[in-house]
Image (cartoon, grey):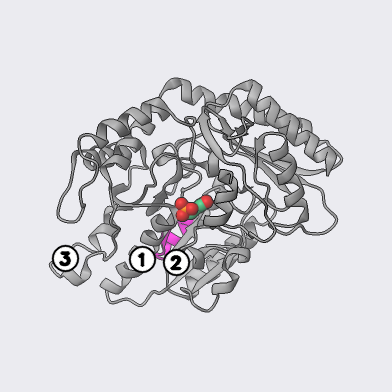
Amino acid sequence: MTLSEKDQLYNWHPYTQHKTVGLLPTIVKGEGALLWDDQGKEYIDAIASWWVNPFGHSNKTIANAIYSQLTTLEHVLFGGFTHNKAVELSEKLLTLLPSNQKKIFYSDNGSTAVEVGLKATLQYFYNKGEKRTKVIAFENAFHGDTFGAMAASGITFYTEAFQGSMLEVTRIPVPNVGNETKSLEVLETLVASERYAAFIFEPLVQGAAGMVMYAPEVLDQMMALCQKHQVFTIADEVMTGFGKTGKTFASDYLTHKPDIICLSKALTGGTIPMAVTTFTQEVYDGFYNEDINKALFHGHTFTANPTGCAAALASIQLLELPEMQLNISRINAHHLAFATKMQSHPKVKTTRVLGVIFALEILTIEAESYYGTMRNKLYAFFIENGVILRPVGNIVYILPPYVITNTQLEKVYSIVEAAVEMI
Ligand SMILES: Cc1ncc(COP(=O)(O)O)c(C=O)c1O
């Protein structure tokens, strides 16, 4: 039996209808932006393996940091103890984050980072004896697959089966071009009429919705409205964090800073699952009390795992290299040129670019569903041509590792162009 056959026998993959999906490629090696399967076929990882890997696969700097940590202190419980790597990482993160962020809470993945943020806002008001149990979120948002994160998510494809079992969330329109006023008005009515605990959003780019973008100015106005009504703002930077938008965090484009920020994915450069939720002093102070019942009752076994912290510290070191910043600008310039070229293509509805994120919408007669026929045809075409891209309906997006070479990037563009012709 091949490894792919054994995989089919033993494994259950995420977001996969196994009845309609055949054998999956078995990846055996990665280097830079490239991956190879067990048949020797090469793939360009044009989405950085679900947006986690900016510094390239099998990165030696991160690997060495992990090895060194594994042979010094691989893990220690974070309840009742601390360790040097958690202290160093928190100190470092606080120098990078907006200056209103003062406390770091560790967890394991993007969904748990969101879960912690939501729970903290709900408990903050509970601790004060104030009834605020509802949250505001955008339509078509994606915040993860745990229950709180699912409740905040608006892509029904992921959450339909669980409606009725979730936290109460009011959804507002995304303020993309043309919808700014409507979105602001809906938010203003909500925060003025009811006591919401939080407003959660993917700042500037809704990743899973197909890299839907909106302007910082309108988000700033929305944050001001929330702050006026003591509604906590939660920036879910799980996708946008660590340079993807061209700045370290999407929140860096804003004048009003979020109360809470969720980070994961690129935090450890695609090596060890880890996440952080960061807080202002005000939120933290809502839990600071002699009463144990007022403590934040959330934790995971691997909270602040030292090996994960070491991987994150090494990743941040790579992010801060001048060459990495140049890579981000280089990719952005290439994306902009490709977007200009594709914008006039008769089969292209629109293109958009921010930082290293590129998206192109193919013109369709009817709305294409998330995992619909067009998506499946495009996906198969990309894989056949050795490029890993996961279109969303009729939207093709590129979010490459920052170390992708110009030649690799040009190959990705040419396959995307061929796919637009083919479809
Ligand atoms: C903005 C955002 N938040 C949260 C998540 C969930 O992260 P994870 O898959 O690590 O749970 C994702 C995943 O894509 C995301 O894009």
- Of callouts 3 and 2, the N-terminal one: 2
**In the rendered structure, does residue 231 fall within the stretch colored magenta?**
yes
Is label 3 or label 2 in front?
2
Image marks 2 and 1: residues in contact by CB distance under 8 Å: yes
- Of callouts 2 and 1, the N-terminal one: 1
Give 133 or 109, whichever is nearer the viewer: 109
Q: Is residue 164 above or below residue 68?
A: below
Give 82 or 98, whichever is nearer the viewer: 82
Give 40 or 69, whichever is nearer the viewer: 40
| Residue drawn at the location 84% of the way across and 40% of the way down | 422
Tell me if 193 is positioned left or right of 274 in this view: right
Q: Residues within 10 Å of mark 2 (few under 14, many from 20)?
A: many
Amino acid type at circle 3 is Asn
Q: Secondary structure at mark 1?
A: helix
Q: Which residue is mark 1?
A: 119
Q: Residue furthest left?
A: 290
Q: Secondary structure at mark 3?
A: loop
In x, y percent, where is residue 187?
54, 65
Amino acid type at circle 2 is Gly
In x, y percent, where is residue 74?
24, 41
Q: Which residue is mark 3?
A: 289
Q: Which residue is mark 2?
A: 148
Q: Secondary structure at mark 2?
A: helix
Amino acid type at circle 1 is Lys
Instruction: Compute the Cα span from label 2 to label 1.
Output: 8 Å
| Residue drawn at the location 33% of the way across and 63% of the way down | 120
In x, y percent, where is residue 172?
58, 65
Magenta-tinted stretch: 223-233
Tell me if 313 is positioned left or right of 238 in this view: left
